[in-house]
Amino acid sequence: MEYAIKHFDSLTPRELYELLRLRSKVFVVEQRCIYQDLDDYDLDCYHLWLRDEQGIAAYMRLLDKGKYPDSVSFGRIIAARRREGLGTEIVRRGIIEAKRLYSPDKIRIGAQLQAEEFYKTLGFVRCGEEYDEDGIIHVHMVLPLRKED
């Protein structure tokens, strides 16, 4: 399994195509959610992914503090194949990269409600009420970080 992290400005056209294709496949087609995936956040993000012989196996984007909404955050988290630990692996790498790049005191995410338990296993805690985003129920969650983490 190969791991990559690149800022948007460093992505090759082929890499960008593959990442956006996977996001569209999962979030638009599989989840039947019509929404504006290309939301301008990508331009200021780091994009992380795991790749194997089948292509991109897991993906996420990492946003600096002040981008969404007031904390370091990440989103568009995808495991191309379920129940293989790929989601856990990419989120763990995202946490490591967030610490390395931004030294945050917390990471805040907007999680799909169906994934809340998954994020709890990684240390995230709910920090708000449920809300609808593009027809899917979400909840804000936060991962508190200590300076020595």
Image: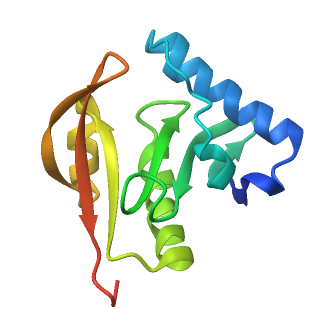
Tally of marks: 0
Q: Where's residue 2, x and y in %?
A: 71, 54
User: Furthest residue to the bottom?
Assistant: 148
Q: How is the image coloured?
A: rainbow
**64 and 2: which is toward the camera:** 64
Does any portion of residue 143 appear in the rendered image? Answer: yes
Q: Please say if 69 is above or below 33.
A: below
User: Furthest residue to the right?
Assistant: 13
Indicate left or right for 51 with 13 as reference. Answer: left
Q: Where's residue 23, x and y in %?
A: 59, 28
**105 and 117: which is toward the camera:** 105
**87 and 11: which is toward the camera:** 11
> What quarter of the picture does the C terminus occupy?
bottom left
Name which quarter of the figure residue 6 lies in.
Answer: bottom right
Indicate left or right for 60 with 143 as reference. Answer: right
Name which quarter of the figure residue 108 lies in.
Answer: bottom left
Name which quarter of the figure residue 146 lies in.
Answer: bottom left
Determine the residue positioned at 61% across, 21% down: 24
Q: Please say if 142 is above or below 18.
A: below
Determine the residue positioned at 58% across, 45% down: 41
Q: Please say if 106 is above or below 131.
A: below
Does any portion of residue 1 appear in the rendered image? Answer: no
Indicate left or right for 31 with 2 as reference. Answer: left
Determine the residue positioned at 75% across, 32% down: 18
